[in-house]
Amino acid sequence: MIPFSVSFDLNDLNNFSGNHIVRRYRDVKNVFLKQDPFLEKENPIIYEVFEVARSEREGDLTFLITIIYPGTVQGEYFMTKGHFHAIEPTAEVYYGLSGRGLILCQNKSGDFEAIPIEKDKAVYIPPFWAHRSVNISCEPLVFFAVYPSHAGHDYETIEKCGFKKRVFAQNDKFILI
């Protein structure tokens, strides 16, 4: 691999040339506490990931932009699936570009943190911590992320165990339940 640069035009990511992952409601409905028949029918996009194509070699880094759209499922804010890294002793950094959200972090011992993310705020997710991003605003939550390319993703553990707390809308604010 040789050094390179990538342009992310946040106003027009349709021309992005890397991996584009789209998660619609039906793809992620099981992460929410309740189901929503209207969203089932409409099947809106909950979030998108624009990931720079890369190797999975140790020492390389993967970087991406994630957009989580505003909305709720029966009062629970739109969020990502959440994951541990398959190679657990790997960290990740998020840098907020727009919107407001929370990064939910939990380790296998049950320790839990909810870290705010917004424009110009960086969040460090240490090794051994699962993480999930939640949009708590009425605009898209957009952030840049970097992690070791060989880290991989363990979604299965979160699918089985979930996170200790969920984020709901209440009186134009968020609450953790």
Image (spheres, grey):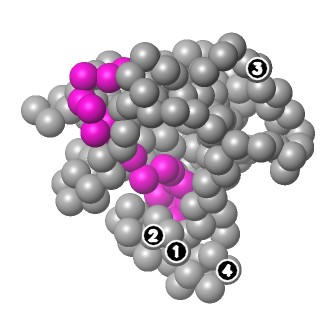
| Mark 3 residue type | Ser
User: Which residue occupies 68% across, 14% down?
Assistant: 3
As drawn, is 110 to the left or to the right of 129? left
Q: Identify the residue under disc 2.
A: 29
Given residues 53 and 50, the one toward you in this image is 53
Marks 4 and 3, the one that precedes in the sequence:
3
Name the magenta segment's main secondary structure. Answer: loop
- Check disc 1 and give the amino acid type: Arg
Q: Secondary structure at mark 1?
A: helix
Q: Nearer the viewer, mark 3 or mark 1?
A: 3
The residue labelled by disc 4 is 42
Residue found 25% across the figure and 22% down from its top: 89
Mark 1 crowdedness (10 Å alpha carbons): few <14, some 14-19, many ≥20: some
Q: Residues within 10 Å of mark 3 (few under 14, many from 20)?
A: few
Asked if labels 3 and 4 touch by Cβ distance under 8 angstroms, the answer is no
The earlier-in-sequence mark between 2 and 3 is 3
Disc 2 + disc 3, Cβ < 8 Å: no
Lower position in the chain sequence, tag 4 or tag 1 = 1
